[in-house]
């Protein structure tokens, strides 16, 4: 086995073995977890796990350290973010290796994720030096200002599918704006979802105790959502867990940002370039084995082009290579774990049993699931109604544009949609009728970067917005301050 971390790299695998990051690399009280490579089952590293007492201690320590961090001059906070970006650039290959081996990413996905994470760090590094307040009108001899102040401690709970990026997109702006952070990454990817970030910020000179990284499962996650020292929860994960997190954090009157699941429609109109549309469809459904919130989970195709679209999509799916992404140069790697594999397989089986046609795929070897195309799907079948989170492309054929809109909108989710058409004005008009926060015309559904508004509606989240200026709304709150030279006079 090639070592993933090393003494000379970003993450010293010997130093962090069995540890969490909370005021330095320390032992925790939730036991340890052996992290294995999904492609081979080989052990990669043993990490420490947090329990709720570790979360309590981390939040208390973060609350203690936060005021000094908020008072640190803006240029110094910006410099920490820039050094973290510089370190990530230097250790890019090592980080990508973890994403491949711990998360089952193909190298292209790992590279893209590392690049997007860098963007998040660079963009966040500009935030501290933005103007951050207003001089307000006042007719009573007052000096009246509104200023944005940090929230305090931000609790970040993140998933395994884009572990580094989805943690960083909350951690980096929260820190940049003067908050302390307690990050709880998912146990499937504790290294790429957290320990790498801890190492980056430690080496970038972030003061001890401002960032805590505590891998763990639902227990410590739930503890974070109600911790008295945590002012905000930034959660990315499934809709079912998001509901629980929302109820708990809402009950504790915390600010929250919920980035949840998706079941995203890719609509192919009758004037579309079907070759291009089928390529978009294949990438949208199969990139990273379909394990992306923005995955094209529903293909809505107008009848005139449906046969050709299904044929081309099937050919593309059948030609994709599935295998160990570290050693084989495959197009698709493994699913993250056995539970996810069983879920995907069951959804496909149930959908075929309900009358759908399996055009290709539907089989697996170990955690490697073949890209799957399902035709003859109707809008009540399981692979249509549920977020699959696997490499499965269900296709529904519709009569016309109105039916396409009705079918696409017939879901609680509302993250992203895509429209393929030969007429961009038609695509833009149709986009206005779709109940999602993001629409792409003549592209597929997966796209994001550090300086766009990103977030879902309905079952996909509470419309939170990450990126550039929107981070100020997320991770700070307004303070109104008045002062006057002469004390105010009152009637009593
Ligand atoms: P998940 O909801 O199972 O877990 C997400 C995180 O929540 C993990 O860290 C987990 O340990 C933690 N958690 C679990 N139960 C908890 C509880 N009761 N209280 C607090 N924390 C708890 O999601 P997952 O399987 O890791 O990720 C896949 C899901 O995430 C998919 O639904 C996907 O669409 C969604 N996702 C959304 C976005 C987005 O930006 N909208 C991005 C990526 C993934």
Image (spheres, helix red, strand yellow):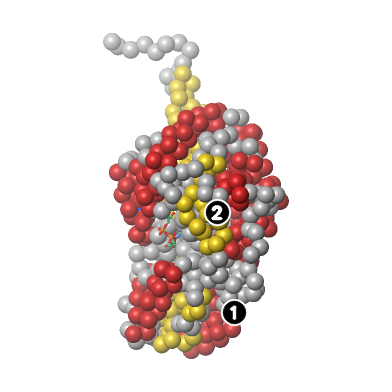
Residue 197 against residue 490 in the figure, above or below: below
Q: At 55% across and 84% down in the image, what residue appears?
A: 318
- Percent across and percent down for residue 343 are 39, 72
Q: Name the foreground residue: 156 vs 26.
A: 26
Residue 300 against residue 451 in the figure, above or below: below
Q: Name the foreground residue: 222 vs 317.
A: 222
Q: Is mark 2 within 8 Å of ligand 1?
A: no
- Percent across and percent down for residue 24 are 55, 39
Within 10 angstroms of label 1, few (less than 14), some, or many (20 or more) residues?
Answer: some
- Percent across and percent down for residue 466 are 51, 50
> Element type at marker 1?
loop
Q: At 44% across and 70% down in the image, what residue appears?
A: 338
Tell me if 490 is positioned left or right of 106 in this view. Answer: left
> Element type at marker 2?
helix
| Residue 455 in sight from this viewpoint | no
Q: Which mark is residue 34?
A: none
Earlier in the chain: of badge 2 and badge 1, it is: 2
Q: At 59% across and 50% down in the image, what residue appears?
A: 196
Q: Name the foreground residue: 280 vs 208.
A: 208
Label 1: which residue?
A: 321
Q: At 43% across and 79% down in the image, what residue appears?
A: 394
Residue 13 against residue 481 in the figure, above or below: below
Label 2: which residue?
A: 191
């Amino acid at each position: 086995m090639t070592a993933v971390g090393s003494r000379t790299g970003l993450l010293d695998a010997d130093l962090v073995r069995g540890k969490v990051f909370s005021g330095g690399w320390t032992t925790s009280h939730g036991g340890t977890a052996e992290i294995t490579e999904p492609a081979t089952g080989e052990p990669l590293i043993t990490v420490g796990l947090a329990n709720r007492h570790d979360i309590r201690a981390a939040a208390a320590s973060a609350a203690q350290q936060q005021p000094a961090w908020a008072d640190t001059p803006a240029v110094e906070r910006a410099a920490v973010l820039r050094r973290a970006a510089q370190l990530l650039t230097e250790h890019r290959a090592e980080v990508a290796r973890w994403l491949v081996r711990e998360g089952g990413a193909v190298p292209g996905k790992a590279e893209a994720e590392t690049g997007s994470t860098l963007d998040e760090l660079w963009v966040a590094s500009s935030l501290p030096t933005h103007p951050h307040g207003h001089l307000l009108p006042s007719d009573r001899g007052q000096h009246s200002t509104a200023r944005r102040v940090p929230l305090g401690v931000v609790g970040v709970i993140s998933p395994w599918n884009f572990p580094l990026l989805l943690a960083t997109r909350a951690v980096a702006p929260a820190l940049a704006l003067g908050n302390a952070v307690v990050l709880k990454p998912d146990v499937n990817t504790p290294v790429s979802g957290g320990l790498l970030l801890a190492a980056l910020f430690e080496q970038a000179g972030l003061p001890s105790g401002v960032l805590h990284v505590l891998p763990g499962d639902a227990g410590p996650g739930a503890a974070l959502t109600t911790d008295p020292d945590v002012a905000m929860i930034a959660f990315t994960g499934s809709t079912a867990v998001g509901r629980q997190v929302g109820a708990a954090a809402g009950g504790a009157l915390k600010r929250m940002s919920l980035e949840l699941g998706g079941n995203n429609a890719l609509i192919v109109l009758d004037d579309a370039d079907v070759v291009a549309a089928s390529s978009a469809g294949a990438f949208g459904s199969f990139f990273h084995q379909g394990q992306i919130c923005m995955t094209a989970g529903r293909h809505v195709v107008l009848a005139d082009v449906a046969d050709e679209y299904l044929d081309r999509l099937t050919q593309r799916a059948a030609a994709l290579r599935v295998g160990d992404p570290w050693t084989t140069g495959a197009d698709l790697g493994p699913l993250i774990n056995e539970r996810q594999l069983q879920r995907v397989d069951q959804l496909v089986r149930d959908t075929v049993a309900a009358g759908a046609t399996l055009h290709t795929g539907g089989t697996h070897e170990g955690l490697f699931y073949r890209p799957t195309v399902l035709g003859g799907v109707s809008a009540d079948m399981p692979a249509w109604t549920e977020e699959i989170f696997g490499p499965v492309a269900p296709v529904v054929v519709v009569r016309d544009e109105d039916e396409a809109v009705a079918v696409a909108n017939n879901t609680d989710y509302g993250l992203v949609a895509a429209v393929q058409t030969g007429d961009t004005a038609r695509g833009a008009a149709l986009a206005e009728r779709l109940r999602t926060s993001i629409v792409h015309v003549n592209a597929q559904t997966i796209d994001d970067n550090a300086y766009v508004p990103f977030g879902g509606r309905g079952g996909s989240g509470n419309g939170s917005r990450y990126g550039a200026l929107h981070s100020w709304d997320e991770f700070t709150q307004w303070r109104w301050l008045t002062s006057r030279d002469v004390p105010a006079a009152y009637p009593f």
